C-alpha cells in the first residue's frame, strides 16, 4: 500500500507519512503478552542495558520484567498516590536508579539494592499532574 501511495499523483507529505506508518504497523507482531498489573499500564521502557523492561500502572506498582523470558523480576510499590505515568532508569546507574512521575504531581526516585530492596523518596511535588520525564546523562 505504501508503494501505491508513492505512485499516486498529488502525493502529499501527510499521505506519504500515513502510508509509511501503515506499512510499519502491518509488519509488527506481538512478541509476548506480559501479565502483572491490576490497572492500565501507562509507561513501558527498557533500561539502558536493555536487559529489563520497566512498566508503571494505575495500580501504583512499578514492575521490572525479564522481557525475553516474559517473567516478573521484581514488583515494587511506587509510593505514588495516583496513576503512575512514567518510570525510567537513569542512564549510567547500572539500571539501579529509577525515576517516576504520576497523576499525584510527584516526581520520585527509587534506588534498588543488590538484595532487591528499594529506597524511595520524593524529589518534587507539582501543583498538577506530572506526565513526562526527561532524563539526560551528565
Image (spheres, rainbow, N blue to C red):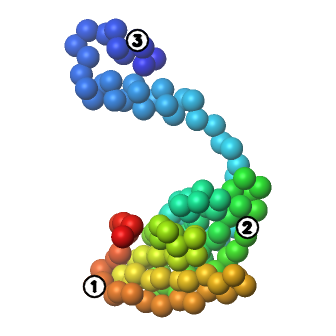
22 sits left or right of 69 in the view: left
Where 67 falls versus 123 (above or below)? above
9 sits left or right of 63 in the view: left
Q: Is residue 35 visible?
A: no
Mark 2 or 3 closer to N-term? 3
29 sits left or right of 137 in the view: right
Q: How far apart are labels 2 and 3 at the CA level?
A: 44 Å
Where 65 falls versus 126 (above or below)? above
Q: Are marks 2 and 1 in contact (CB under 8 Å)?
A: no
Q: How far apart are labels 1 and 3 at the CA level?
A: 50 Å
Mark 2 or 1 closer to N-term? 2
* Quarter-of-image position of residue 28: top right
Residue 98 in percent (x, y) is at 52, 75
- Residue in front for this viewpoint, 128 or 53: 53
Q: Quadrant of the C terminus?
A: bottom left
User: Disc 2 on helix, strand or loop?
Assistant: strand
Indicate which label's residue lies in the foreground, 2 or 1. Answer: 2
Q: Disc 1 marks which residue?
A: 127
Q: Disc 3 marks which residue?
A: 4
Q: Disc 2 marks which residue?
A: 72
- Residue in front for this viewpoint, 50 or 138: 138
Amino acid at each position: 500500500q505504501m508503494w501505491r501511495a508513492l505512485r499516486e499523483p498529488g502525493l502529499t507529505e501527510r499521505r506519504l507519512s500515513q502510508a509509511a506508518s501503515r506499512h510499519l504497523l502491518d509488519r509488527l507482531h506481538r512478541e509476548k503478552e506480559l501479565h502483572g498489573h491490576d490497572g492500565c499500564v501507562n509507561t513501558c521502557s527498557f533500561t539502558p542495558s536493555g536487559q529489563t523492561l520497566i512498566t508503571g500502572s494505575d495500580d501504583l506498582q512499578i514492575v521490572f520484567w525479564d522481557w525475553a523470558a516474559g517473567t516478573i523480576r521484581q514488583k515494587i510499590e511506587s509510593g505514588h498516590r495516583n496513576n503512575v505515568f512514567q518510570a525510567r532508569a537513569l542512564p549510567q546507574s547500572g539500571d539501579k536508579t529509577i525515576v517516576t512521575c504520576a497523576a499525584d504531581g510527584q516526581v520520585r526516585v527509587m534506588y534498588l539494592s543488590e538484595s532487591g530492596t528499594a529506597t524511595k523518596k520524593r524529589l518534587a511535588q507539582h501543583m498538577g499532574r506530572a506526565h513526562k520525564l526527561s532524563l539526560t546523562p551528565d
